[in-house]
């Protein structure tokens, strides 16, 4: 398996410009760090909170979105008072630099664990959206002692397989097709209209440019087995979209509720796969309560 890479230097330059524009939508981080792992250098952004002893939030983005995808959610998350760390996923479009192939889910879990260690943290609350949710779940299965809680927002390949249409639309975004076709494919993946993709601002532009210019070569996740789900004894919050879910919809929610030992599973009305952005205010309130509860029940 080869490494994720930009198709051309011109494409990389386009991506960097789009990335910088999208990052400008976020509050300026207090710390920007490139940390070394066994698989490459991972870009991280840290916003310090006023509760230094509280376990930090670790944010894992959806595919091709990078850390900038959290622009709309960061203000609400900041109200927790805790430190927040956002990573660019290794092997995906972003400013992380992959140097060794990621061949298995265990590899995905290892780079994340090494990055958390490199930043000096022992216990964390991990939050993942879409493919970031799959990575967060994979890490939690293999390093459960690390987590105070696990938050999965429309996590693909976690509690069930996504619809077959996802594979087709995702493949289309990587081809040299007209921009209208690309926007239609991205809209279908995100569960929004093409018009919404066109007006999604810097983050929408970033995702579109990333899908066009970057080739990701990552292992395809597999849904968790029942045995793996039973390992996840920390508090787990799962948010599933009411419509056009890529996480598996109601069947995935039912499986998570039945098999996870300590889970809160909710289907959010009037949302699609873009749930974190579509329900940012009520979701933020819900998660702040969940994280506080998890802190209160964590082993001393």
Image (cartoon, grey):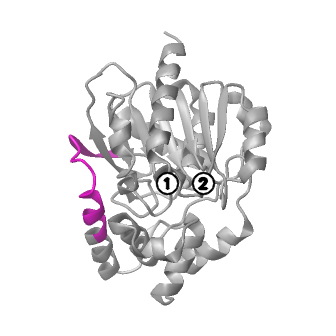
SS state under label 2 = loop
Which quadrant of the structure image shows residue 219? Answer: bottom right
Q: Position of residue 208 (x, y in %)?
A: 43, 73
Q: Residue furthest top?
A: 300
Residue identifier under label 2 = 270
Q: Position of residue 6 (x, y in %)?
A: 39, 74
Which quadrant of the structure image shows residue 47? Answer: top left
Q: Residues within 10 Å of mark 2 (few under 14, many from 20)?
A: few
The residue depicted at 55 percent of the width and 64 percent of the height is 190
Residue identifier under label 1 = 278
- Label pair 2/1, CB-CB below 8 angstroms: yes
153 sits left or right of 248 in the view: left
253 sits left or right of 75 in the view: right
Q: Position of residue 88 (x, y in %)?
A: 39, 53
Q: Which residues are magenta?
A: 18-35
User: Given this view, does label 2 or label 1 mark the residue nearer the observer?
Assistant: 2
Is residue 32 rendered magenta in the image? yes
Q: Residue furthest front?
A: 270
Could one spot residue 279 in this view of the protein? yes
The residue depicted at 56 percent of the width and 76 percent of the height is 185
Q: Nearer the viewer, residue 192 or 258?
A: 192
Q: Residue furthest bottom?
A: 178
Q: Earlier in the sequence, mark 2 or mark 1?
A: 2
């Amino acid at each position: 398996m080869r490494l994720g890479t930009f198709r051309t230097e011109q494409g990389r330059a386009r991506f960097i410009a789009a990335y910088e524009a999208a990052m400008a939508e976020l509050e300026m981080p207090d710390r920007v760090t490139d940390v070394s792992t066994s698989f490459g250098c991972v870009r991280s952004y840290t916003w310090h909170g006023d509760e230094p002893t509280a376990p930090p939030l670790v944010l894992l983005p959806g595919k091709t979105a990078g850390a900038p995808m959290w622009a709309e959610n960061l203000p609400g998350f900041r109200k927790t008072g805790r430190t927040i760390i956002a990573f660019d996923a290794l092997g995906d479009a972003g400013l992380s630099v992959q140097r060794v192939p990621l061949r298995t889910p265990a590899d995905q879990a290892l780079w994340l664990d090494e990055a958390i260690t490199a930043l000096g943290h022992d216990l964390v609350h991990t939050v993942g959206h879409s493919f970031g949710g799959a990575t967060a779940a994979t890490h939690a299965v293999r390093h459960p002692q690390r987590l105070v809680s696990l938050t999965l927002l429309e996590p693909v390949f976690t509690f069930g397989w996504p619809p077959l249409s996802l594979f087709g639309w995702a493949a289309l975004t990587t081809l040299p097709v007209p921009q209208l076709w690309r926007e239609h494919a991205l809209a279908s993946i995100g569960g929004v209209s093409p018009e919404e993709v066109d007006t999604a601002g810097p983050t929408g532009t970033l995702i579109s440019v990333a899908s066009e210019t970057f080739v990701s070569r990552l292992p395809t996740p597999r849904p968790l087995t029942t045995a793996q789900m039973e390992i996840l004894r920390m508090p787990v919050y799962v948010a599933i979209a009411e419509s056009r879910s890529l996480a598996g919809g109601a069947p995935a929610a039912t499986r998570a509720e039945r098999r996870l030992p300590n889970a809160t599973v909710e289907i959010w009305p009037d949302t699609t796969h873009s749930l974190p952005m579509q329900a940012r205010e009520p979701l933020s309130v819900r998660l702040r309560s969940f994280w506080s509860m998890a802190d209160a029940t964590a082993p001393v």
